[in-house]
């Protein structure tokens, strides 16, 4: 529970499996196994999902660059961010932003 709370409070932090295991007071392997059993995915996979969900909200804000969004959610490299984003969402951050902008337009009469 403590590891999940920390992940949600600071997804941008440079988390490692070892760091999360320390928060939980378990060995890396015990933590990874228990986390996967309780949550349904690996700790770092969960973190990727969490970061991408936060990024989706930031990407629809006007003026937010992809580099700034990547940094805000914990990715120092925008290429790595784009790759993780596409793995989760199925489209690149740029494609997601374009699609969100189109959906926000009023319907033509």
Image (cartoon, helix red, strand yellow):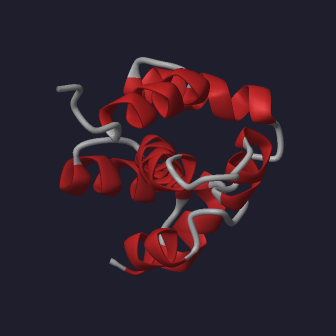
Give x and y (percent) for residue 3: 45, 72
Q: Nearer the viewer, residue 1 or 102?
A: 102
Which quadrant of the view contains residue 74?
A: bottom right
Rendered residue at 60%/26% (across/down): 94
For the point 21% across and 49% down, which residue is it?
37
Q: Nearer the viewer, residue 10 or 30?
A: 10
Name the image quarter holding the N terminus.
Answer: bottom left
The C terminus - image quarter: top left
Q: How many marks?
A: 0
Residue 92 is drawn in which quadrant?
Answer: top right
The answer to whether residue 61 shows anywhere in this view is yes
- At horizontal 50% and vertical 44% (from top left) the residue drawn is 48
Q: Position of residue 88 (x, y in %)?
A: 41, 29
The answer to whether residue 25 shows anywhere in this view is no
Q: Residue at x 53, y 65 (%)?
A: 21
Q: Which is more toward the observer, 49 or 92?
A: 92
Whether residue 36 is situated above or below residue 12 in the rendered picture: above
Question: In the visual, does 71 lie left or right of 59?
Answer: right
Task: State whether residue 91 is above or below residue 107.
Answer: above
Q: Position of residue 85 (x, y in %)?
A: 53, 31
């Amino acid at each position: 529970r403590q590891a999940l709370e920390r992940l949600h409070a600071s997804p941008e932090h440079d988390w490692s499996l070892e760091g999360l295991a320390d928060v939980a007071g378990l060995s890396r392997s015990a933590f990874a196994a228990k986390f996967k059993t309780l949550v349904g995915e690996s700790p770092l996979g969960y973190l990727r999902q969490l970061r991408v969900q936060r990024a989706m909200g930031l990407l629809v804000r006007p003026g937010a660059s992809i580099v700034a969004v990547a940094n805000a959610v914990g990715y120092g490299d925008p290429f790595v961010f784009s790759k993780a984003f596409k793995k989760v969402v199925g489209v690149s951050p740029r494609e997601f932003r374009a699609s969100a902008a189109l959906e926000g337009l009023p319907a033509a009469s």
